[in-house]
Image (cartoon, grey):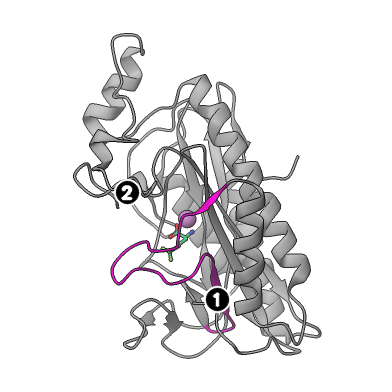
Amino acid sequence: MITRNDLCWCGSGKKWKKCHYPQMPSQSQNALARQYHKQYGILLKSPEQIEKIRIACQVTAKILDALCRHAKAGITTLELDELSRKLHQEYHAIPAPLGYGEPPFPKTICTSLNEVICHGIPDERPLQDGDILNIDVSSIVDGFFGDCSRMVAIGKISPDKQKVIDVSLECLTRAIAICRPGAFIWQIGQTIEDYATEHGCSVVNQFVGHGVGIAFHEPPEVPHHYNQLGIEMAPGMTFTIEPMINAGVREGWIDETDHWTVRTKDGQPSAQWEHTLCITEKGCDILTVLK
Ligand code: MF3
Ligand code: CO
């Protein structure tokens, strides 16, 4: 996570706190926003901020959609990264993963194939019939962040691959359905792990969803597995849900060479879908659904 004294994501060379660091909740914001910031570090967004995040999320979703339509047998994930660079330029957007973390993530998107759980790096391997691919796009537009991912099946895929794709999408759909003011963050993990285990799949617990919008990764963490996080959802919370569901064991290994690619310990397939949400007065808005 970016902290106040890190360099700003915008490339200005200034510290984040001197550059694009968000305005702290002030007297003009309500007591709940001040309490959430103080108690959890969570920034409840203002209507103006939500509109900016919505725009960023729509750009992110459009880029993701174009990349998914381009993903076919014979295309390399490096070509998808090149298309992503071009589309980010066209939309005046910055790809958030590029240069992110330590070691700096080297590409503009994550492409996670088959047994790769997440954080796969685009490379020269052409997509093949039978592959399943997660494409994860995170974009910065006018200083605000969107984050979403989807699965693509290349040609004819095996029943076990189809199953993790279907189970992970249903986990995301069911988790979104419980999101509204007063629901607890732990209910997301409960909903997802109940459904996944009932269908013979496991839920990755090494990586979680996250607050997003003003920074790439903000509080709170949003676990997809059973947990006890007693934070109540409140209007203006913006966060991702991005369940990683495995056909076999839940554990993953981080690649020792690139320090990013995470593969299942047993080599069985894994699938993930992701949306950015905003809690509203009555329920939630899926900001990364294409409008
Ligand atoms: N949706 C992923 C996440 O929130 C995107 C990771 S990009 C990376 O973690 F640069 F961190 F790999
Ligand atoms: Co994310």
Q: Looking at the image, which is closer to me, 23 or 147?
A: 23
Q: Is residue 109 above or below residue 91?
A: below
The residue type indicated by label 2 comes to Gln
Residue 275, x across and y down, in percent: 58, 50
Residue 233: name its quadrant. Answer: top left
- 185 or 77: nearer the eye? 77
Question: 103 above or below 247?
Answer: above
Residue 131: name its quadrant.
Answer: bottom right
Residue 75 seen in the figure: yes
Magenta region, residue range: 93-115
Q: What residue type is labelled 1?
A: Ser
Residue at image mark 1:
112
Who comes first in sequence, dot 2 or dot 1?
Answer: 1
Secondary element under disc 1, as helix, strand or loop, is: strand
- Taking the view exactly as shown, the residue that stands out farthest to the front is 12
Query: Can residue 179 be seen in the rendering of this structure?
Result: no
Q: Residue at x 40, y 58 (%)?
A: 208
Q: Name the residue under label 2.
A: 228
SS label for mark 2: loop
Q: Tell me the crowding category of disc 2: few under 14, some 14 to 19, or many 20 or more residues within 10 angstroms, Cα based.
A: few
